[in-house]
Image (cartoon, rainbow, N blue to C red):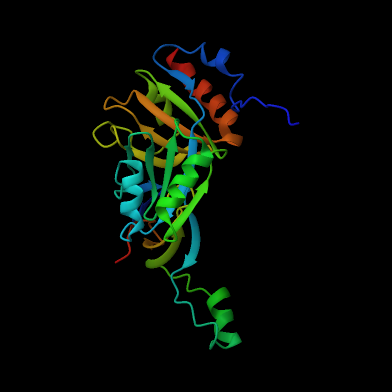
Amino acid sequence: MTADLARIGPLHQWGGLFATLPDSVQVLTEQFVAQVDLRLDPAGPAGADVAAYLGVALPEAPNTWVQGDTATVIWLGPDEWLVTSPFASPEALEAGLREAVGADGAVVDVSAQRTTLRLRGAHAADVLASGCAVDLHPSVFATGSAAQTTVGMAGIVLLALDDSASDYRLLVRSTFARYLASWLLDAAQEHS
Amino acid sequence: MIELPCPWCGPRGVSEFRYVGEGATRPDPATATPQEWRAYLYLHENARGWVRENWYHTAGCRRFFKLERETESNETRAAT
């Protein structure tokens, strides 16, 4: 008999610290999502099959993400995407995509690789900008924009969720999550 | 910070990249002499002025690409 282990995120004990932040900079830990790394030739036949499975075409423009019916698809490279879904189990998402891709690409479950943070508030972009060199102005980084970049010393995938530079999703490698959380708490100090 | 033009991600800070070396043409390992292979690996032009270089976008799209850099002023531009 195996023990039933509860799934906990790397930041499950940080809620109290995040709660001390002002309304203009809110940090929240988001729920666990299944994450699958997808590699295929977008010009090949697998692209259409994957689009049919996900209900949305794979974004081919660099630095973008799109929302499907049940999954989010993030551009990671000219032949690479990150598919995340809060609805499917990692195994189900991987199996479904693998069936759609067939032999024309690679599908790997990377759910354990990254954890998700939400950064919201009027000063969200200001906090990020103190350690992130990407231009975050909403005229160039609005809803549907994504960037793989660094915040402080941590590599992240940054998604813009609104057009007013006040709502972001940050996917960070689990082992860097506490570093990033500390960094955000520190950077938020000047806005409290 | 120097800004490099990634052909996929656009302009990004140089700390996201790794320098991979001068943009020399790799000789065919099957036919290259040991001298040619050594020259390819270890001998560099180290020229002044505009040079062609290989870079790797470590913290971004993780793709290798070529760009041109002015070694005196550190101006950069997309490789033509």
Corner quadrant of residue A139: top left
Q: Is residue A98 above or below residue A117?
A: below
- Whether residue A35 is visible here, answered yes or no, is yes
Q: Quadrant of the C terminus of chain B?
A: bottom left
* Pick the front one: B45 or A152: A152
Residue under the image location 60 percent in, 86 percent down: B34
| Total numbered labels placed on residues in the image | 0
* Pick the front one: B40 or A38: A38
Corner quadrant of residue B76: bottom left
Q: Quadrant of the N terminus of chain B?
A: top left
- Give x and y (percent) for residue A1: 76, 31
Q: Is residue B58 above or below residue A103?
A: above
- Give x and y (percent) for residue B71: 41, 62
Residue under the image location 36 percent in, 56 percent down: A46
What is the residue that sits farthest to the left in this orientation? A139
- Give x and y (percent) for residue A2: 73, 31
- Whether residue B9 is visible here, answered yes or no, is no
- Give x and y (percent) for residue B56: 46, 57
Residue under the image location 37 percent in, 34 percent down: A70
- A108 sits to left or right of B34: left
